[in-house]
Image: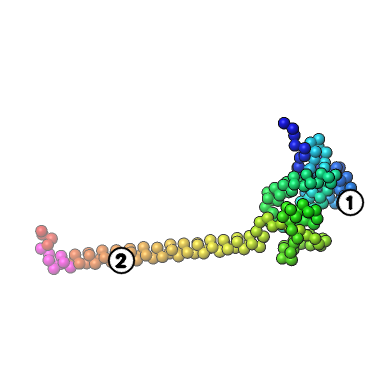
Amino acid sequence: MSSPPYRVRRATLDDIGQLSALWQSMHLAADGLSKRVTEFQVAESAEGKLLGAVGLQIAERQGRVHSEAFTDFSLAEQLRPLLWERLHAVATNHGLLRLWTQEQAPFWNHCGLLKAEAGALEKLPAGWRGQNSGWLTLKLKDDLETVTSLDKEFTMFMESEKQRTARAFQHAKVLKAVATLLAFAVMVLVLAGAFILLRKNPHLLGR
């Protein structure tokens, strides 16, 4: 059984040499990116030669796909789906709410990353807002505001349920107390009636 031609994995410090050469060939800021090497997923050949890489920066439970690079762009069509599958898995594992990118290859549109509207851009993490326009975005989960709102609603519901339960218990205690008092009153009336009856008819004791 033949081995798969390509393998995708997380980059390690051992990849810095090959990655730096790749970034430089793409005119990317190799010095800055080398300090963030663990953000990257890499695709390599069966022999271990690095063929491509793409980064995923995480901030405020959102991810930025960036710095896509290939040693040979004729392989991009085969490698991009593998890298995307890996990126999506990482995003899911981190519980990310939304993905962003400024990569302009049509592939990213096919993955569901579409031009960000004004409303979506308001959710862009502050640290990325100073960068150029052209953002594409993909919503993975409910936005943070929605999650927070749902959490608040659930908390309010639980508090309301606690109060309702407390009122029910209090009502039950009152009913129990009333029932006890009624039972005691009935017992007193029965005893009083028996006492009066015996006083008026003492001969009943002799029967």
| Circle 1: element type | loop
Is residue 197 covered in magenta? Answer: yes
Q: Is residue 27 left or right of residue 125?
A: right
Disc ID at residue 9: none
Above or below, 8 against 58 in this view is above
Label 2 crowd bin: few (<14), some (14–19), many (20+), radius 10 Å: few
Residue 102: x and y in percent read 80, 57
Q: CA distance from mark 2 to mark 1?
A: 91 Å
Q: Which residue is mark 1?
A: 27
Above or below, 164 against 81 in this view is below
Question: Which of these two is toward me, 20 or 117?
Answer: 117
Question: Which of these two is toward me, 84 or 14?
Answer: 84
Q: Residue at x 13, y 68 (%)?
A: 200
In the picture, residue 100 is in which quadrant? bottom right
Q: Is residue 15 left or right of residue 171?
A: right
Location of the C terminus (image quadrant): bottom left
Looking at the rendered image, the disc whose residue lies closer to the viewer, 2 or 1, is 1
Q: Main secondary structure of the magenta part?
A: helix
Q: Is residue 81 left or right of residue 29?
A: left
Question: Which of these two is toward me, 157 or 53?
Answer: 53
Location of the N terminus (image quadrant): top right
Disc ID at residue 182: 2
Is residue 130 covered in magenta? Answer: no
**Is residue 11 in view from this perspective?**
no
In the picture, residue 13 is in which quadrant? top right
| Circle 2: element type | helix
**Is residue 106 in view from this perspective?**
yes
Magenta residues (range) = 196-203
Q: Residue at x 86, y 48 (%)?
A: 23
